[in-house]
Image (spheres, coloured by chain):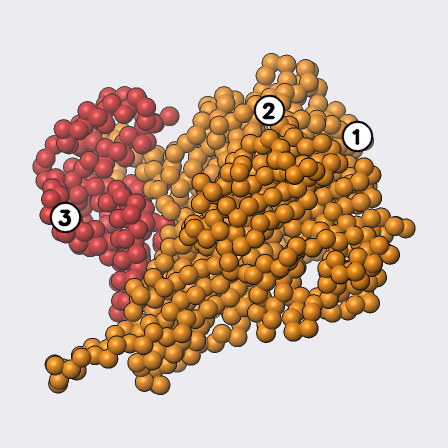
Chain colours: A red, B orange
């Protein structure tokens, strides 16, 4: 959708339920997909997606165009909703940026035999620390520009580049050697 | 890598390798409950309508993706329409100013309610949500999920409601208990009086009853009728049916339009974002080949959405790019969802009505109708077969390496198909037909629901098959058959039953191929090689068998008879009776018209069976609903015997059942007798969710003329309320179907009456 069309639609969505419905129809797939990539649980992804769109509805009157796509705002809300969820999970341990891939990495390797390569490389991304994973998913799963990822994550472009660099480097280190042959 | 910011970031070759792998792949599509999206939208829209405030001045740019145009067409299948049941509720502890007052005029007693719709009950005042939700009772018994969305109670059936069924939703609107008076803490809130229950009535759509189904024919019995050439060879490049029975075709640019007026192509009505480069145009054409209107200048390869209303197609731009767009059948552009470098050589493929698959640079891509990419797997494809299930998320793919799979886009999981499988075709019921080449011919497989492909037939030695196309009733397939290695000029059209039996010629011509049934089943579109070697598009009409045509005629007579009775027109009703029939009604076998104080409100056929050895006698069961004071209270059934008399079927005999009060336990909605390779099946459809343990050969039986149960095997499909008895019936012998009151719904309520109906062996 061209930028001016989206801006028009967003402006109308501040007062027109049908326009908001159109935004929902347009962005539901990617927001749900992104939420799921972060929480890896269908029920939780549904909760997060629901929360994102209800927050968007409640606050759309205050949304102002900042030069980034409307979806950036939705991604931001999603990240916050996921973070809220993790904050509520006292027993959950989030990997540190500097940690190695978990000791379950061999199980990923075991799955090499039965999974296709695409699936494996994304399984490996699932094992990355939270911020690296978010940056990698937004870059390679959602095709966002680094500047937009930075806006979504509330970080500088340089910080995002660092996250991507670290993520790719860790995948390079940890993935089995046959990946060098590339996808077929 | 060809992406500057990644090129800049990753200089190391090993890292670039990983980045390239990432760019070529995508994470698997997450599991998604197909109801969730619709459900969340429902909630959001309800809240949006409640909270969003319109401003005085509206609208900005005059054009957009036009969601109001596109979305309803898409949502019709993807989401269905909401049933909003308005009710008038008086909350007794509220001031009159806050009483609920909703418009119920177009909602209460609504008929033709789709069976898959959620039920939304809006309240306008504070209510005790838990108490209200707990008070909901649905008759017939139906398993549902209840959710509160703001002040709306959303009731979502766990699976589709039964057709032809009057439902009642009863609930007790109980207000929020009053809070204590803070100025007088010792005061005790007055108990909230229990209000009178609110009852909302609605009726679901009338479902087809075999063999009177749309299409009103059995494809397994049709034969070739008259044929018609749509246009000269070379004047239609490709084409297909719309769900409403018109044709979407690609023609060379500048072809004559209605009235044979030449129609300028690229200069015609702008129908897309850019002026197209026209070498071909997409036209809407009647089934007889009359051009109706130019839809897409510069368009090619149209593909109609299964839900109707819109189609996807390619439109070439002046820069030799191709836009994948969506248009409606008026030619109104709805949106562009992808752009390719180069001109595609195949049509986009719909998967359900909200996803589209296409090939770009040797890769399979799937997008939703807004262009958002939805597929997870990176698959190489070129010329292989590609077909999307009309029902939902399954896509059959023949990849470039010869591996064929069915991908579930909801879960991302692939199901392998037999090696070299090709020629995919999905039926209207969601079964996949496919072909597997063999050294001396070809094997035909069916994968029910896209899984567990099973070989059902092989071509005769030395013959090969192609161009599979399902009949709309999913009972048979049409295909093109020719000798192995021969040119298409020797191809002819054949029919085969869905179980692999009954291979036979459809047409006698030797140069026909690419058959496509119309959605109504009355026509087949195909191509035929002409004398000059060109291929022209033709249609042939399908002629129902003598029995099916006779059944249709008998049912049409019943329709006339019943409409006259519903209107209270005794004279017209009696004109459908022969002397014996008239005597039967006058003798009190059944009331011809509704008794005083009541009204025959509606009816539907419960069963249609041939009883005579010749198609001159039919048994038609009808269920008649009786209302009093405008509310349907009960029903009874008549078994009408129709006999052919001087070119017209007349009612010759009638028996009727006792009246059954509505809303008291499960009932039989319809039944049918079907011949299968294993014997006869008697399929009994119920209206309520049943306790499976009560559906047994003790509670559902077919009895012989002496009243003894005959041996049977019984299966039960709880989601579709369908019990199937497999029995051996003597042809033209009469039996009794008996459903006892041992059958109970999920609440343990038994059938109000034992059900008896005639079954005739086929």
Relative height, residue B597 to residue B143 (above, below): below
* Residue depicted at x 37% and y 81%: B99
- Residue occupied by mark 3: A89
Front residue of this view, candidates B100 and B329: B100
Q: Nearer the viewer, mark 1 or mark 3?
A: 3
Distance between the Cα atoms at labels 1 and 2? 26 Å
- Marks 3 & 2, CB-CB < 8 Å contact: no
* Residue depicted at x 63% and y 14%: B440
Q: Position of residue B733 (x, y in %)?
A: 73, 36
**Subunit that carries the residue with mark 1:** B
| Mark 1 residue crowding within 10 angstroms, few (<14) / some (14–19) / many (20+) | some
What numbered label is drawn on residue B509? 1
- Residue occupied by mark 2: B456
Visible residue check, residue A13 = no
* Residue depicted at x 65% and y 30%: B728
Q: Position of residue A16 (x, y in %)?
A: 40, 70
* Residue depicted at x 43% and y 71%: B198
């Amino acid at each position: 959708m061209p930028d001016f069309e989206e801006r028009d639609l967003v402006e109308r969505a501040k007062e027109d339920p049908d326009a908001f419905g159109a935004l929902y129809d347009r962005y539901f797939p990617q927001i749900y997909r992104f939420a799921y990539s972060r929480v890896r649980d269908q029920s939780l992804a549904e909760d997060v997606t629901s929360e994102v769109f209800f927050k968007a509805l409640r606050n759309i009157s205050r949304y102002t165009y900042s030069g980034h796509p409307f979806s950036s705002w939705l991604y931001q809300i999603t990240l916050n909703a996921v973070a809220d969820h993790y904050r509520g999970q006292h027993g959950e341990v989030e990997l540190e940026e500097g940690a190695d891939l978990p000791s379950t990495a061999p199980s990923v390797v075991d799955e090499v035999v039965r999974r296709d390569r695409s699936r494996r490389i994304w399984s490996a991304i699932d094992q990355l620390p939270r911020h690296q994973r978010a940056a990698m998913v937004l870059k390679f799963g959602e095709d966002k520009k680094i500047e937009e990822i930075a806006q979504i994550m509330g970080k500088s472009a340089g910080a995002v580049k660092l996250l991507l660099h670290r993520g790719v480097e860790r995948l390079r280190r940890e993935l089995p050697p046959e990946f060098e042959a590339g996808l077929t | 890598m060809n992406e500057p910011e990644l090129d800049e970031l990753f200089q190391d070759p090993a890292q670039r390798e990983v980045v390239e792998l990432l760019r070529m792949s995508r994470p698997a599509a997450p599991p998604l409950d197909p109801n969730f999206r619709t459900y969340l939208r429902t909630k959001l829209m309800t809240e949006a309508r409640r909270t969003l405030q319109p401003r005085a001045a509206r609208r900005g740019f005059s054009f957009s993706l036009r969601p109001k145009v596109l979305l309803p067409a898409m949502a019709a299948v993807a989401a269905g329409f909401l049933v909003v049941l308005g009710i008038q509720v008086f909350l007794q502890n509220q001031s009159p100013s806050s009483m609920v007052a909703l418009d119920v005029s177009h909602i209460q007693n609504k008929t033709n309610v789709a069976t898959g719709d959620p039920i939304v009950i809006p309240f306008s005042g504070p209510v005790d949500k838990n108490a209200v939700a707990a008070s909901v009772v649905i008759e017939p018994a139906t398993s549902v999920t209840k959710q509160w969305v703001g002040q709306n109670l959303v009731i979502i059936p766990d699976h589709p409601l039964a057709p032809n069924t009057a439902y009642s939703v009863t609930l007790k609107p109980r207000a929020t208990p009053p809070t204590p008076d803070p100025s007088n803490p010792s005061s005790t809130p007055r108990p909230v009086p229990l209000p009178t229950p609110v009852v909302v009535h609605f009726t679901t759509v009338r479902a087809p009853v075999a063999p009177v189904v749309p299409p009103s024919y059995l494809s397994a019995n049709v034969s070739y009728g008259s044929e018609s050439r749509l246009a000269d060879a070379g004047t239609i490049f490709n084409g297909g049916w719309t769900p409403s029975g018109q044709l979407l075709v690609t023609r060379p640019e500048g072809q004559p339009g209605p009235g044979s007026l030449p129609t300028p192509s690229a200069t015609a009505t702008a129908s897309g974002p850019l002026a197209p480069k026209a070498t071909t145009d997409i036209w809407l054409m009647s089934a007889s080949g009359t051009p109706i209107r130019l839809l897409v200048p510069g368009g090619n390869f149209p593909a109609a959405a299964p839900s109707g209303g819109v189609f996807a197609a390619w439109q070439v731009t002046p820069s030799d790019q191709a836009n994948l767009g969506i248009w409606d059948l008026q030619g109104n552009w709805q949106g562009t969802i992808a752009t390719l470098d180069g001109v595609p050589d195949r049509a986009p493929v719909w998967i359900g009505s909200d996803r589209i698959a296409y090939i770009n640079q040797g890769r399979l891509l799937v997008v939703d109708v807004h262009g958002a990419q939805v597929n997870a797997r990176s698959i190489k494809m070129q010329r292989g077969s590609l077909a999307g299930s009309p029902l939902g998320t399954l896509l059959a793919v023949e990849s470039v390496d010869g591996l064929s799979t069915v991908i579930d886009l909801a879960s991302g999981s692939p199901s392998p198909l037999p090696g070299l499988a090709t020629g995919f075709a999905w039926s209207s019921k969601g079964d996949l037909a496919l072909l597997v080449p063999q050294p001396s011919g070809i094997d035909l497989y069916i994968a029910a629901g896209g899984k567990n492909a099973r070989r059902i037939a092989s071509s005769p030695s030395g013959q090969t098959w192609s161009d599979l196309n399902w009949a709309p009733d999913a009972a048979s397939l049409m295909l093109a058959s020719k000798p192995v290695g021969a040119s298409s000029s020797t191809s002819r059209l054949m029919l085969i039953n869905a179980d692999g039996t009954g291979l036979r010629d459809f047409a006698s011509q030797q140069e026909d191929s690419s058959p496509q049934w119309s959605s109504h089943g009355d026509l087949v579109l195909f191509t035929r090689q002409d004398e000059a070697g060109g291929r022209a598009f033709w249609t042939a009409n399908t002629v129902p068998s003598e029995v099916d045509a006779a059944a249709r005629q008998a049912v049409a007579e019943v329709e006339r008879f019943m409409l006259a009775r519903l209107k209270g027109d005794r004279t017209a009703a009696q004109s459908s009776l022969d002397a014996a029939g008239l005597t039967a009604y006058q003798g009190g076998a059944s009331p011809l018209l509704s008794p005083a104080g009541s009204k025959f409100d509606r009816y539907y056929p419960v069963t249609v069976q041939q009883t005579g050895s010749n198609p001159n006698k039919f048994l038609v069961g009808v269920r008649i609903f009786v209302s009093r004071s405008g509310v349907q209270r009960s029903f009874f059934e008549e078994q009408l015997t129709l006999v052919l008399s001087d070119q017209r079927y007349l009612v010759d005999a009638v028996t009727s059942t006792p009246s059954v009060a509505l809303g008291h336990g499960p009932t039989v909605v319809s039944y049918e007798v079907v011949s299968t390779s294993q014997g006869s099946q008697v399929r009994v459809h119920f209206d309520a969710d049943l306790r499976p343990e009560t559906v047994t050969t003790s509670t559902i039986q077919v009895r012989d003329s002496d009243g003894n149960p005959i041996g049977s095997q019984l299966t039960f499909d709880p989601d579709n309320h369908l019990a199937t008895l497999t029995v051996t019936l003597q042809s033209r012998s009469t039996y009794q179907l008996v459903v006892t009151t041992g059958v109970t719904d999920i609440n343990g309520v038994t059938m109000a009456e034992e059900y008896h109906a005639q079954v005739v062996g086929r």
